[in-house]
Amino acid sequence: MNAVMQRLWAPLPRARLAGVRILVGLFVLGYISYRLPLLRHMARQDPDIFAPVGPLAWLLGAPLRPALVDALIAATLGLALLFAAGILYRLVAPLLAVAVLAVTCYRSSWGMLFHSENLLFLHLCVLALAPAAEVWSLDAWRRSRRDRRAAATTSASGSATSTTSPVDPDGAAHGFTLRLLAALTMATYFMAGVAKLRNAGWGWVTGDLLRGHIAFDNLRKAELGAPFSSLGGLLLRHAWLFTPLAAFAVVIEVGAPLTLLHRNAARVWALAALGFHWGIVVLMRIPFHYPLSGVAFAGLFPLERLPDLVRRLRPRSRAPDSPARPAPG
């Protein structure tokens, strides 16, 4: 048990957690902006369609006025920007989690439940309680300026200068938070894999069910005039392809928790899961936006090295020019 606890609380760079904060905030900003026309149209549908889900089932008996929905969306966009920038983080982060829950639940209250945003909300809840704005944030920049001014004032007054020790780049709380984010991500895949096997048994791995599901989904979309995958339809002729594809999906989902045992295994799994989601887009035109963006897996990678990578990729400054020639006399 002690070994497990030591592993869970082993320090990781706080800059990595800050990088996750920035990416998640930017994802929310981009995702809500992308969905803005749909969200605004949804708020103006026939009120008889409205069937509140989640916390809204306790709070709402009728749809909100469209102006209130527009205000909620605008507030969510503003909070996402502040969240990514690390401004008033302790206040903004919980508010953003609540706002995202409200927007996504309201969207799911109009006829179709969407589960793809659940992981995003869980990550926001964890980040809201975590020290994710200690670096790479405007809060940290303001604290740094205040500390420098205080040190300069103390030095100018002739008092003994009390120097604040530099912030430790590693922390147990940061390591635990990043591992918790990874565990939540992998738990969602594991539950999806268990649901497949419980409902269909190991027959899922033969590929017949996957092939039938892809055929039905693309046919339904074609009949309704919605975008569908032409490639998915063409591949249905080759039944043998779907056995390895189905086996790959089950391994990715059921085997997800095992990758927590080793850092490199988790990174390989994340890349495979990312490929899995892009495969779903190619074969079925179904995007699970949060994992598809890669942000859901970002904490598994050394984001703290990004500034060094950017500096190395910058073109080097040219050598100083040779001395200017004297002007002709």
Image (cartoon, rainbow, N blue to C red):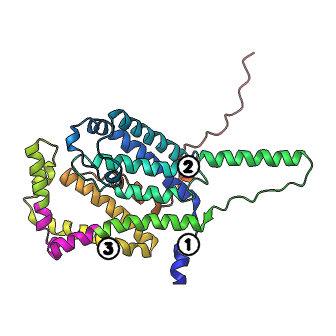
Residue behind mark 3: 255
Q: Position of residue 253 (x, y in %)?
A: 29, 69
Q: Residue at x 42, y 47 (%)?
A: 99
Q: Nearer the viewer, mark 2 or mark 3?
A: 2
Q: Which element type, helix, strand or loop, lies under badge 3?
A: loop
Alpha-carbon distance for marks 1 and 2? 25 Å
Label placed on residue 91: 2
Does the stretch in magenta take in 211? yes
Circle 1 or circle 2, nearest the eye: 2
Residue 46 x %, y %: 21, 37
Instruction: Using the image as rendered, state which of residue 73 and residue 30 is in the foreground.
Output: 73
Q: Which residues are magenta?
A: 192-212
Secondary structure under the numbered disc 1 in the rendered image:
loop
Q: What is the crowding at mark 3: few (fewer than 14 residues within 10 Å), some, or many (at least 20)?
A: some
**Residue lying furthest right:** 158
| Amino acid at the residue labelled 1 | Trp
Which residue is pictured at 58% across the width and 50% down the height?
Answer: 136
Measured as percent of width and height from the top left, residue 147 is found at 75, 49
Magenta portion: prevailing SS class = helix
Seen at 36% across and 51% down, the residue is 293
Tag 2: amino acid? Leu
Q: CA distance from mark 2 to mark 3?
A: 37 Å
| Camera sees residue 267 | no
Which of disc 1 and disc 3 is earlier in sequence? 1
Q: Which mark is residue 1?
A: none
- Residue identifier under label 1: 9
The relative height of residue 59 versus residue 202 in the rendered view (above or below) is above
In the shown orientation, is residue 163 left or right of residue 192? Answer: right
